[in-house]
Amino acid sequence: MDEKTRTFYDQFWPRSVPHYEETKKYMLATIREKHVGRSLDAGCGHGVCSVVLSEFSDEVTAVDLSGKCIETAKIIAEKFGRVNISFRQEDLQQLDMPDGSFDLVWCWGVAMMAPRPELVFRNIFRVVKPGGVIYLGVYLKTWLSPVHQFLRHLFRRFFATGRRKQFVLDFFAGLTGLAVKMKGQEINLRPDNISIQVQVEDWFYPPFKTFYSPGEIIAKMRQQGIDGQVIQAQAGRMKSATIFVVRGVKRADHA
Ligand SMILES: C[S@@+](CC[C@H](N)C(=O)[O-])C[C@H]1O[C@@H](n2cnc3c(N)ncnc32)[C@H](O)[C@@H]1O
């Protein structure tokens, strides 16, 4: 199990649960299926996405590396009275589920956080049923990606805790606020209850991160019998300029 990422998210999502309504609005604008049998929330974090999936799925399986996230997700599911979600603490790199288990897989902002993302891709692609669908959100590779990686390593090494870390979070929050003000937009970049500081933490502090081009993801899907199409080029409920979303459909004749 990837202990570094587990430890990071153990302390992260339990204190930063996003608003249900905003998350739901985003998911329903993204997912085309109106009703499905079995769904997988791969990397469920706070569990809000699992709740939304459970409203149009017969059954949902919510998987996360982090035990604290699973605890939080269970509380959220109970709060919304959802009884068709089962939770599993598991590493998607070693996902122990049979091929073709799900009609729909939702994996948003997760796969590229693993030390070996290719194992996550292989597993989440193989558990999609023939004819089933996957929604995959991953970080977009741009010319800024190496700069980002450099800063992330720097911050994780020298500004990892206490006041130093708070300085980084406040500095980038201030910078973002300034940029937004200059553009004449609203300061709250993310309407689902996540502060800029929390977004900065999620951006610069996870232990592992890989950036991809849409072409790379579509090619990986094709190798496992999935036809992928970019449905959001630079988007997401995070209003992030660096996540893109691919919708993939597994060919009906793919075993
Ligand atoms: C940025 S959060 C995204 C949460 C949620 N999918 C969402 O869209 O809000 C990433 C989540 O993926 C989980 N995660 C990262 N690597 C994982 C892995 N290898 N297996 C299972 N979960 C993982 C983390 O614990 C964390 O909860």
Image (cartoon, rainbow, N blue to C red):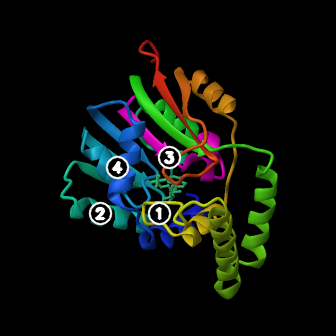
Q: Earlier in the sequence, mark 1 or mark 4?
A: 4
Q: Nearer the viewer, residue 149 or 185?
A: 185
The residue to which callout 4 is attached is 24
Q: Check the image and report above or below for 148 versus 241.
A: below
The residue to which callout 2 is attached is 76
Q: CA distance from mark 3 to mark 4?
A: 14 Å
Q: Nearer the viewer, mark 2 or mark 1?
A: 2
Picture residue at 59% right of the left edge, 44% below the top: 138
Q: CA distance from mark 2 to mark 1?
A: 15 Å
The residue to which callout 1 is attached is 66
Residue 104 lies in the magenta stretch: yes
Q: Nearer the viewer, residue 20 or 139?
A: 20
**Residue 199 seen in the current view:** yes
Q: Earlier in the sequence, mark 2 or mark 3?
A: 2
Residue extent of the magenta highlight: 99-119
Mark 3: C-beta under 8 Å from nearest atom of ligand 1: yes
Q: Earlier in the sequence, mark 2 or mark 1?
A: 1
